[in-house]
Image: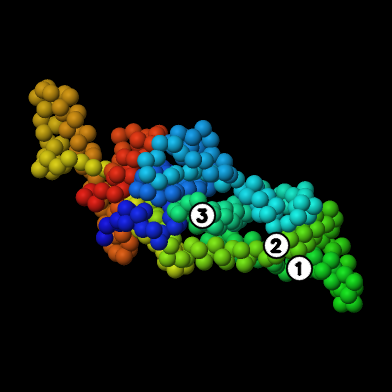
Amino acid sequence: MTLDIDAILTNPEKHIIVCTGSGGVGKTTTAAALGLRAAELGRNVCVLTIDPARRLAQAMGLTELDNTPRAVAGIANGSLSAMMLDMKRTFDEVVESHSDPERAEQILSNPFYQALSSSFAGTQEYMAMEKLGQLRAQSQWDLIIVDTPPSRNALDFLDAPARLGSFLDGRLIRIITAPARGAGRGIGRIAAMGFGIFTNVLSKLLGAQVLADVGNFVADIDTTFGGFRERADATYALLKDSGTEFIVVAAPERDALREAAYFVERLNQDSMPLGGLILNRVQEVPETGLTQDQVLAAAQKLTAEGRGPLTAALLELHAQRMEIKERQKHLAMRFTAAHPDVAVQPIPAMAQDVHDLAGLREIGAALANQGITW
C-alpha cells in the first residue's frame, strides 16, 4: 500500500502533521521538504522542530531558528515559516499570558520554577504541546508540521503532559501547599500541625529553601492558571483528531525499521491517526537485465584479462548497490508483512546532502512520486 503524500498535504481538513522516527534517518529534512511542498501547493505552513539540530534553518535559507516563526522567502503559492522550540521561553510565555505582571514576576523569579522550566523531565515535550496548541489557535497557518526529537523520546510528548500534570497535581505537592490553601480555616490549622512534623523531615532531606520554593511555585501556578492536565488534554485531543496525521520516518535498515515498528504500534495503541511510513534513502539501481552474480563475473573476467580496469570497478560498484537494494527490499518487506495496513512511500537516496530549497524540492517531488518501485 503506497502512501499518497500530496493527498494529505492538499487536504484542507488536515491541519497537523507529526513526523516521528529514530535519529539519523533524515526526519528533520523530510519535515522541511513536506513543509515546502505543502506551501508550494498553496498551504500556509509552519514547521516546528523540537530537534536541536540547525539543519532546518540552513536548508531553508534562514540564519537562525528560535521560538518565533520566521518566514521563508521564495515560496511560490502559499507561505512557509519555521521555528525551533525554546522550552523555557515557551513556559515563560504561558506564565505571562495567564497571570498579572506582579504574579508572573513572582513565578519567573522562583528558583524552583527556573529549574523546572529548564531541565525537568518531560517539560520539553509538554512545552512542545503548548506551542503546538498556540500555533493551531492562530489563523495564520492552516498546516503545522512538527519535527519531533530523535529516538523513542520522539513520542514522549504523548506521556509528558500527564507526567507533569500528575506531578503538579500529585499528593506530595498537595501536602506541601495544603497549609497555604487551608490557612484561616479550622481544618487548615489542624492540618498545619501535622504538616509541621512532615515538613521538618522534608526540610532535612531537601533543604528548607527548596521546600519553600516548591510550595510558593505551586501555590502561584495554581492560582494563576489552574491545572496543567486540562490544558494537556486539549492538545492531546487535538493530536487524536482526524485533522492530524502522524508520519513515521525510517531508513531501510534493521534498527531504524525496528524503531519504526515501535512507533507504529505505540500510535495504534493510543488510537493516534497514522498516515503511514516514509522510507528514506532507498537504494535505486538501474535495470540491466543481469543478476548480481553475472555482474560480478563480468568484473572478475575483465580484471583477470587485464582489460578495462575502470569498467571492472564500475561493475563491482553496481553489484554492491544491487546487494544493498536486495537487503533493503528484504527488510522493507518484513516490515510491510508485519504491518500490512501501514501505507509506505520510499524516497531514493540523494547524491548529496540537502542544504537548500532546491534540494528540499527534490525530496518533495520524490515524496509525491508514486512510481518508485523496488
Q: Which residue is mark 2?
A: 225
Q: Quadrant of residue 16?
A: bottom left
**Residue 280 visible in image:** no
The amino acid on which the numbered mark 2 sits, given as a three-letter code, is Phe
Residue 320 picture location, percent across and down: 23, 38
Of residues 91 and 139, the one drawn nearer to the viewer in this rendering:
139
The residue positioned 73% from the left and 57% from the top of the image is: 99
> Mark 3 or 2 closer to N-term?
3
**Residue 298 visible in image:** yes
> Mark 2 or 1 closer to N-term?
1
**In the current view of this chain or complex, which residue is farthest to the bottom?**
186
Tell me the mark number nearer the camera, choosing from 2 and 1: 2
Q: Measured along the vertical axis of the image, is residue 359 above or below residue 4? A: above
Residue density around tag 1, few if under 14, some if 14–19, many if 20 or more, within 10 Å: some
Q: Secondary structure at mark 2?
A: helix
Q: Which residue is mark 1?
A: 174
> Mark 3 or 1 closer to N-term?
3
Colour scheme in use: rainbow
Q: Secondary structure at mark 3?
A: loop
The amino acid on which the numbered mark 3 sits, given as a three-letter code, is Ser
Q: Which residue is mark 3?
A: 139
The amino acid on which the numbered mark 1 sits, given as a three-letter code, is Arg
Tell me the mark number nearer the camera, choosing from 3 and 1: 3
The residue positioned 68% from the left and 50% from the top of the image is: 92
